Image: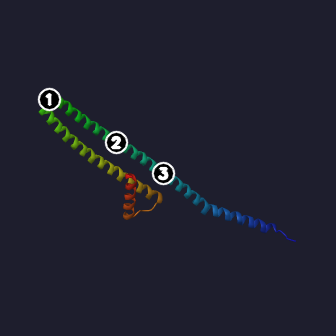
Amino acid sequence: MIDINPQILIIQLVTFLAGLWIIWKFFIGPLTKRMEQRQLSIKQNIESAEKMKSDIQQLKSDYEKQLAGIEQKATEIINSALQQGQLSKEEIIKQAQEQAKFLLQKTQEQLQSEKSVVMKQIHNQVAELSVLIAEKILEKSVDKAVQDRLLNEIVNELKS
C-alpha cells in the first residue's frame, strides 16, 4: 500500500504554490504587461495611420478644388475674350481670338504644370507616409535602397 505522509504533502503543496507565485510574479505578470503595452502601441500606430490617411484625403480634395477653380478661371478668361471679340470689328475679333488662343495655351500649360506638381507632391506624401507607417509597424528601419524601391512601387501603383 501507498502511504501518504501529510508533512511531505504539505511541503510539496507549499513548494508548488511558491513556484507558481514566482513564475507569475517574474515571468507571466511582466510578459502580460508587455503584451498589453505592445497591443496599445499597435492600436495607436493604426489610429495614427488612419488619421494620416484622412489628412491625405483632405489634401487631395483641397488640391482638386483648387484645380477646379483654376479651370473655372481659365474658362471665364476665354469667355470674356470671346465676348469682347464679338463686339469689336473683324480686326479686333482676330486679335481677341489670337489672344484667347494664347491665353488658353498658356493656361493649359500652367494647369498641366501645376497639376503635375500637385500630383507629384501627393504621390511623394503618400509614399513617405506609407514608408513611415511600415517602419512604425515593423519597428525597424528601412534602408534607403529599400525605401526608394517601395516609393517607386507605390508611385507606380498610384499612377495606374
Q: Secondary structure at mark 1?
A: loop
Q: How far, Cα to Cα, is label 2 from label 3?
A: 27 Å
Image location (x, y in percent) of residue 23: 64, 64
Which residue was labeled with disc 1? 88
Between the residue at mark 1 and the residue at mark 2, the CA separation in whole angstroms equals 37 Å
Crowding at mark 3 (Cα within 10 Å: few <14, some 14-19, many 20+): some
Q: Quadrant of residue 3?
A: bottom right
In the image: residue 142, left or right of residue 82: right
The residue pinned by badge 2 equals 64
Of the residues under marks 2 and 3, which one precedes in the sequence? 3
**Residue appearing at x 31%, y 48% in the figure:** 118
Q: Residue at x 55, y 55 (%)?
A: 36
Helix, strand or loop at label 2? It is: helix
Task: Determine the residue positioned at 31% across, 39% down.
Answer: 68
Q: Which residue is mark 3?
A: 46
Report the residue that reaches farthest toward the front: 90
The kind of residue tagged 2 is Glu
Q: Could you tell me residue 132's position as x and y percent?
A: 41, 56
Q: Evaluate if marks 1 and 3 touch, with contact meaning CB atoms under 8 Å apart.
A: no
Crowd band around label 2 with a 10 angstrom C-alpha radius: few (<14), some (14–19), many (20+): some
Where residue 5 appears, as percent x and y from the top left, is 82, 69
Residue in the picture at 47% in, 57% down:
137
Q: Nearer the viewer, residue 33 or 122?
A: 122
